[in-house]
Amino acid sequence: MDVYKDQSQSYEKRCADLLQRMTLEEKVGQMMQLPANFDNNMDKLESMNIGSYLHCTGDMMRELQTRAEKTRLGIPLIFGIDAIHGHCFDNRATVFPTQLGVSCSWNRDLIREMGAVTAREVRANGIHWTFSPVLCVGRDARWGRVDETFGEDPWLIGEMAAEMVEGYQGKEGFANWEKILACGKHYAAYGEADGGRDAYEADVSRRNMLTYFLPPFEKIVKDGCATLMAGYQAINGEPCSASRWLLRDQAKESWDLDGFIVTDWDNIGSLHTKQKVAEDLKEAAYIAVTAGNDMIMTTPSFYKHTIELVKEGRLDESMINDSVRRILMAKFRLGLFDEYRHTSPEREAAALGREDHWEAAAQASRESLVLLKNEGILPLKPGAVKTITLVGANADDVVAQLGDWSFGSMQAGASDDSFHRDVTVTLLAGLKERAEREGITVNFVKGADPLDENLDECDQAAAAAREADLTVACVGDTLKLHGEFHDRANLDLTGKQQKLLEAVKAAGTPLCVVLLASKPLTVPWIKENADALVCAFNPGAKAGEGIAEVLFGDLNPMGKLTISFPHHAGQIPVHYNRFSGWHSMNDPAMPGEERYIDMPEEPLFVFGEGMGFSPFSYADLKVSKSVLQQGEDLEVSVSVKNEGDYDGWEIVQLYINDQFSSLTTPVKELRGFKRVYIRSGETVTVDLTLPFEELSLINADLQRVVEPGRFDIMVGASSRDEDLLKTVIRVE
Ligand code: GLC
């Protein structure tokens, strides 16, 4: 038996044996990834020795995998898909909140479970790899893809991404029907493009790359994340897929990436056609291999050009061998050469949409909800309400609720709009079901639609509001107002939504707003005028239940924002970890006459804020040492009391501030958090460990060091100064 087929041999030996049997054409073919669903790419499997397909499910996938088995060496295909908040491109699968939504749970276990459920369903489907998690830093809400991020804080992004990778990959390998390869994307600083312009130039210094944008990737690579995806954009003029520093020096050499790097969609073609750093596509192929891209997504010309470049001696075949070895090793480790090559309809049916999966998704929906305002109207008092008027198109819009990379997305190619409609509980459905249990009537008047400038039923909505004891207004955005290629300069509510809010407010009935959106929108009127506000970032298929549970008090909301809300797009960037040097009069005699003269300095809502039905109070902040030697971790404790009538969860946050440093550092940075459940009236002591390394900065020599000096240690309920207890330690 050929060694590469011999299951008694190590994967390394089998891979080496296979590699030396392969022709140059077969090797370069392994580096190719094509979309199965257009350009007759299915026909190219044999002629171009294709190694991977994406956006390929069901019969297309089964056909291709079977044909691959019949090729000369029978190398299995690896299939990748964007299963980024559940396996949303299969109508039978479980749909979770988007990353931004679930990040507001601050729940590590939940995020890991979301990954595990998605992996089980994707793998059962015969697909091996998800292009997830997204590690982009969501600091500019004008960017269309903020919904895909874990918010604005790089440290928290790293923590959450690590959980999601573990959910996808597990710790015991992925030669099984439970696990898939993860893919950290978009490597790196893709969300940092100027002006929130998707895939546009990002001007990021090396020091800021090492400070903010690389650490989350470094964390997951060192945790064993199997693949990275190179970003579209150029950083300081160098496209990610042309950056040897990013791909080879950092990921492969410094962090010892054990897997491979795939480009984003036609990154290599874009080197020539968009970014103009390659005279022609052949030059682009040369740059691609030299920089260290291993798998080339949708640049068909790469195949013949790379073969030519090797034959002409311009590319050393050893670089091809290294990429192909990385790809083949991933296929061996997935068990694709062995019993895990073909799934079965029975396995799919058993895994997709499993009851416990939907329970996990429903819990993720609940924990993603953030209560941002409540002037005592929630939870609804029994008997206080007989009629509820519900307004706003988003109260009954599955596409708006599920968000991007689900059936409304262009990649889904949904045959009709039935995808996930039957399993989705909209706010209208959830509220009606919950209210009618208590004989409460719910009247729904659409009133306004984020996509329809002409829809104006504001008068009808106001009339219905006048008849009600409570008005619930569900406003926000929807697909086509966000996503790839869909950036915004203006983040105000679209359509007649603002007019609708003012009309129902004028009716005088208590007003609870549900902001159902992909990302922060500029909603200062809501903060000012709503009696309650629930933020639901694309909260998943079961969110209608969760929101109704919050309104009726069955659920004590526990979410906290992982991203700041600007008052106005002109305030961006508005993230919490900003610097202290903003020029101001600093003259107490002239308060307010400083910084923005036409806008508050503070965000509308801040990173880390969110409330429940019980207020929590903090006291007794203690640290294990007031002086730390180099390398010593710090133990921090604080007592937290539930001052209200409702048992509930509190997300305790730990921030640091390096008081004086050789280079500027932010006024505060999140470096720890813990979720604690506290019963009404009880006090608990919360213990947090601050690893010494978390006090570090990147110095002028681009070295990560902890500089001696004083550090503020702050613990509390949000990133607001007034929510934080503070003490000072000194590092020797
Ligand atoms: C898209 C996205 C990337 C996705 C890939 C495959 O353009 O930028 O996030 O994984 O192409 O669909």
Image: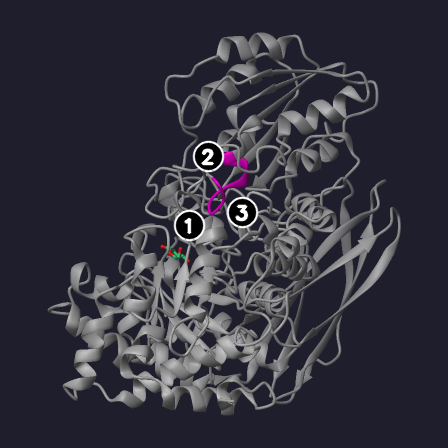
Specify the amino acid type for callout 3: Asp
Name the residue nearer the viewer: 608 or 365: 365
Q: Dot 1: what SS?
A: loop
Specify the amino acid type for callout 2: Asp
Identity of the residue drawn at 53% across and 23% down: 392
On the image, the x and y values in percent for residue 46 come to 32, 68
Is the distance from the Cβ of mark 2 to the nearest ligand 1 atom less than 8 Å? Answer: no
Q: Tell me the CA gap for discs 3 and 1.
A: 22 Å
Q: Which residue is mark 1?
A: 145
Q: Tell me the CA gap for discs 3 and 2.
A: 24 Å
Q: Tell me the CA gap for discs 2 and 1.
A: 13 Å
Q: Which residue is mark 3?
A: 90
Check the image and report above or below for 235 versus 251.
above
On the image, the x and y values in percent for residue 587 come to 44, 52
Name the residue nearer the viewer: 1 or 110: 1
Q: Which mark is residue 477?
A: 2
**Residue 547 inside the magenta-drawn segment:** no
What is the quadrant of the C terminus in the image? bottom right
Q: Which residues are magenta?
A: 399-407
